[in-house]
Amino acid sequence: MENNNKLTAERSLEIIAEQIEQSQRMIKKNSALPMIWWGLLVTIFALLIAYLWKHHGGPVWNALWFLMAIIGLIGNLIIEKRKENAPPSFVGKTIGHVWATFGIIASLIGWTLFMAGVGWIPAEWVVPDKQVYINITSVICLCYGFGSTITGFVLKSRVFLICGIIAGVGGYFLAMHYPWVEQMYVMAGVAFIGLVIPGLIVHFQNQK
C-alpha cells in the first residue's frame, strides 16, 4: 500500500512537470508573433518620433507613443485570435503578470513625465531639483530587461534571456550617454534586439 502511494505521488509529480513543460513550449511558440509585432511597432515609431523630433517641433512628438500603444493593442487582439488555444496555466499567468507590471510602470512613468514636460502638472512635483535629470529611456530599457530576463528564466529560453539582457543593460547605458533625440535610436535598437530578433528566431523554430 505504501509503495502504491509512493508510485502515485511520483506519477503525480511527473504529470505536473509534463504539464509545466508543455505550457512552456506552447507559450514560447505563441509568443513569436506578438514579439515581432510589438518589436517592429516600437522600432518604427521610435525612428518616426526621432525624425519628427529632430526636424519638426521637438520632444512634443513623444505623444505618438500613446497612439502606438492603441495600434499595438488592436494588432495584438488580432494576433491573439490566430494563436493556438492553450489552457490557463501558472506559467502563462506568471509571464502575463510580469509584462503587465512592466506595461503599467512604464506607462505611469511616461505619462507623469510627459504631463510635467508640457505643463499639465507642476514639474517640481516630479523633479524637485531642477538640476536633476530623469532619463526615462534608461528606466524603460531597464524595466524591459527585467521583464525579458524573468520570462527567459520561466520559459527556460536562452534566446529570450540573452536578448533581454543585451537589450536591457545595453539600452540602459547607451541611453545614459546619448541625450534627447538620439535616445529614440537607442529605443529602436532595444526593440529590435530584444523583441524582433528573438521573435523571428522562435518563429523560424516553429516552422521546422
Image (tube, rainbow, N blue to C red):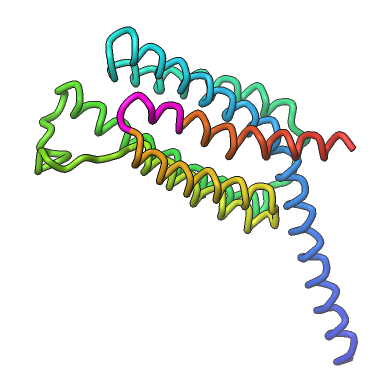
Name the residue at the top extreme: 56
Could you say which quadrant of the image residue 15 lies in? bottom right
Q: Is residue 87 above or below residue 49?
A: below
Residue positioned 54% across, 33% down in the render: 191
Our reading of the magenta stretch's main secondary structure is helix
Q: Is residue 150 left or right of residue 181?
A: right
195 above or below 145? above
- Asked if the stretch drawn in magenta spans residue 118, the answer is no
Residue 198: x percent and y percent? 67, 40
Q: In which quadrant will I find the C terminus?
A: top right
Q: Position of residue 100 (x, y in %)?
A: 48, 42
Give the residues in magenta.
Answer: 179-186
Residue 59 sits in quarter = top left
Q: In the rendered structure, does residue 183 fall within the stretch colored magenta?
A: yes
Query: Which residue is located at x 65 percent, y 21 percent?
Result: 78
Locate the N terminus and report the quarter of the image it occupies.
bottom right
Check the image and report above or below for 204 versus 50.
Answer: below
